[in-house]
Image: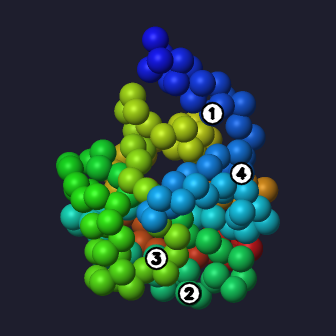
């Protein structure tokens, strides 16, 4: 009964959500982080994984973040183990990997599920608005109003013109 109540509450929250600011996520360090702190900024939410063919996109995401952060871009990495078991690590292991391998400075959050019956409420909202996550490194571009502008599939590199033009237009 408790599980059903939790799932029902999550579903109602997601259905009622008008933007990402209504969600609070846990940072990779375990701190509750209200996404409302990003109000007025453009957010690129990315489901990341450390053992994926797309993992080198961390470098491109970091370059994108450095290029546009002072103009109001936030990249938010959400580790997920939904595809091929490619993010098996703990939050601590993921943080160490990101720090040592890619020197990531953009926010990384605690590992979540981005699809399936245990999908995080944030990703229920994002996929309702932008479409299903099919693999690691799918990117949701979220406007300054907290609403999804567009989803970019995994194969779209962080430096791709279609992504950078969309970010620049949103900024």
Would residue 150 be found to the left or right of residue 170 on screen?
left
Disc 3: which residue: 61
User: What residue sits 64% from the left and 25% below the top?
Assistant: 12
> What label does residue 74 carry, if any?
none
Question: Which of the two labelled residues, at mark 3 and mark 4, occupies the earlier sequence position?
Answer: 4
Q: CA distance from mark 1 to mark 4?
A: 12 Å
* Element class at badge 4: helix
Q: CA distance from mark 3 to mark 2?
A: 9 Å
* Element class at badge 1: helix
User: What residue sits 53% from the left and 18% below the top?
Assistant: 5
Disc 1: which residue: 14
Would residue 87 be found to the left or right of residue 123 on screen?
left
User: What residue sits 72% from the left and 63% below the top?
Assistant: 37
Q: CA distance from mark 3 to mark 4?
A: 22 Å
> What label does residue 66 carry, if any?
2
Q: Label 4: how many residues lie within 10 Å, few (<14), some (14-19) or many (20+)?
A: some
Q: Position of residue 30 (x, y in %)?
A: 47, 59
Disc 4: which residue: 21
Question: Which of the two labelled residues, at mark 1 and mark 4, occupies the earlier sequence position?
Answer: 1
* Quadrant of res 99: bottom left
Q: Label 1: how many residues lie within 10 Å, few (<14), some (14-19) or many (20+)?
A: many
Q: Is residue 87 above or below residue 60?
A: above
Q: Is residue 141 visible?
A: no
């Amino acid at each position: 009964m408790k599980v059903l109540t939790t799932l029902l509450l999550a579903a109602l929250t997601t259905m009622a959500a008008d933007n990402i600011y209504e969600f609070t996520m846990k940072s990779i360090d375990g701190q509750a982080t209200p996404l409302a702190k990003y109000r007025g900024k453009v957010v690129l939410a990315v489901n990341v994984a450390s053992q994926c063919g797309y993992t080198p996109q961390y470098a491109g995401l970091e370059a994108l973040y450095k290029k546009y952060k002072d103009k109001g871009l936030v990249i938010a990495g959400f580790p997920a183990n939904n595809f091929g078991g490619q993010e098996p690590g703990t939050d601590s292991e993921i943080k160490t990997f990101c720090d040592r391998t890619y020197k990531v400075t953009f926010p990384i959050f605690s590992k979540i599920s981005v699809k399936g019956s245990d999908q995080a409420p944030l990703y229920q909202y994002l996929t309702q608005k932008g479409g299903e996550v099919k693999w690691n490194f799918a990117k949701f571009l979220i406007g300054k109003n907290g609403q999804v502008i567009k989803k970019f599939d995994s194969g779209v590199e962080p430096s791709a013109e279609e992504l950078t033009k969309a970010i620049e237009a949103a900024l």
